[in-house]
Amino acid sequence: MAARIRAEGPLSFNQWVEACLYDPQDGFYSSSGSAGRRGDFITSPEVGPLFGAVLANWIDNRWIDLGKPENFVVLEAGAGPGTLARSIFAAKPKSLTNGRYIAIERSEAQRKIHPEEVESVADFPNDAITGVVIANELLDNLPFHLYSADGEKWYETMITGQFEEEKGREVEPPMPLPPQSGSEIPVQIEAHKWVEQAIGIVNEGSILVIDYCSTTPKMATEPREKWLRTYRKHQEGSIVTKHPGTQDITVNVAVDQLPDGFNINSQADFLTSNGIKDLIEEGKEIWKKESATGGLEAIRARSRIVEAEALLDPNGLGSFSTLEWLINQ
């Protein structure tokens, strides 16, 4: 990366994050980075199959809302190794009896381990769909620009060949914000474009984004560490400009920089409204009946309680936001 900077000049933060995470040879997700208990971080699908079971309920509800079309498509963006897809198929949603599940994942290594039920692709398909698009913790991993204020103006932050930050061109923030000295904000053009692309590919249906979210004015008043983080082996990593390609880079999603028209809820409220408590009660009943035998079904049923606690935790995953855009409904 240093050689690229010497050849091309300083990189924008957007270019830096893109290279650190997605460079075909040296990017974090192209080499060693992954989610899961043995990976670098835990997302809701890795907690256990309960999250996927609730998503299967939501998918079926949206399928019913659309009149149960036979050409129904579930399109999961940022599918990683396919953990969420496996959980959704395990729940046996009726919408996928004749429907299609398309898993979008940039990493070839991760596409190779997708479950056989899915169609694995590297990018959005060309044809429009009737169905749903799901993005769980994707937007926080998309490249973004970093703007900094010096008390008088806003500037774009650049990365030098020594992997240090320097002041770049003068810029205007995406909304009126006072250039208070020390203020910084992420400018998430790629996230906005992604949502626009998702909206454009859906003829009729829904787009569901699940992520940790904030607003641009709020982040402008906070230290960077509140909304820009790195992770490696379940621990917070080093500062973002160090050790490129060896750690995850993640940023809170500024909802006021996304296309309008979404309904927003907490993950806890979304899961509750889509039947997580019924699944917990079902698990308790299975445990009562099968616990004496100690079978796998009983153990899975018992684990739902622990999984639910993590998924609904108001200080953890439960505080994530769900954003849903309804298209032509």
Image: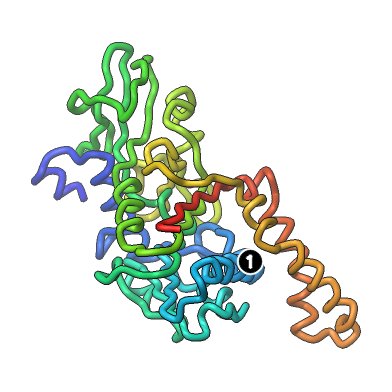
Judge from the rendering whether residue 276 lies leftward or rightward of residue 8; answer left or right: right
Q: Which residue appears at 51% of the width and 34% of the height?
A: 226
Asked whether 195 or 72 is in front, the reply is 72
Say few, some or many: other residues with alpha carbon within 10 Å of mark 1 (under 14 / 14 to 19 / 20 or more): many
Judge from the rendering whether residue 232 lies leftward or rightward of residue 119; answer left or right: right
As drawn, which residue projects farthest toward the left? 7
To which quarter of the image does residue 161 belong? Answer: top left
Residue with the mark numbered 1: 54
- Element marked by disc 1: helix
To which quarter of the image does residue 73 belong? Answer: bottom left
Judge from the rendering whether residue 165 lies leftward or rightward of residue 77; answer left or right: left
On screen, residue 224 above or below 83: above
Q: Is residue 113 visible?
A: no
On screen, residue 145 above or below 24: above
Task: Give how far across and how far down residue 141 sits, in percent.
Answer: 39, 51
As drawn, which residue projects farthest toward the top? 152
Q: Which residue appears at 55% of the width and 55% of the height?
A: 234
Number of numbered discs overlaid on the protein picture: 1
Q: Which residue appears at 12% of the width and 43% of the height?
A: 6
Q: Which residue appears at 8% of the width and 46% of the height?
A: 7
Q: Is residue 99 visible?
A: yes
User: Which colouring convention does the figure follow?
Assistant: rainbow
Task: Give how far across and how far down residue 106 sits, in percent.
Answer: 32, 66
Q: Amino acid at mark 1?
A: Val
Task: Give how far across and how far down residue 245 sits, in percent.
Answer: 33, 55
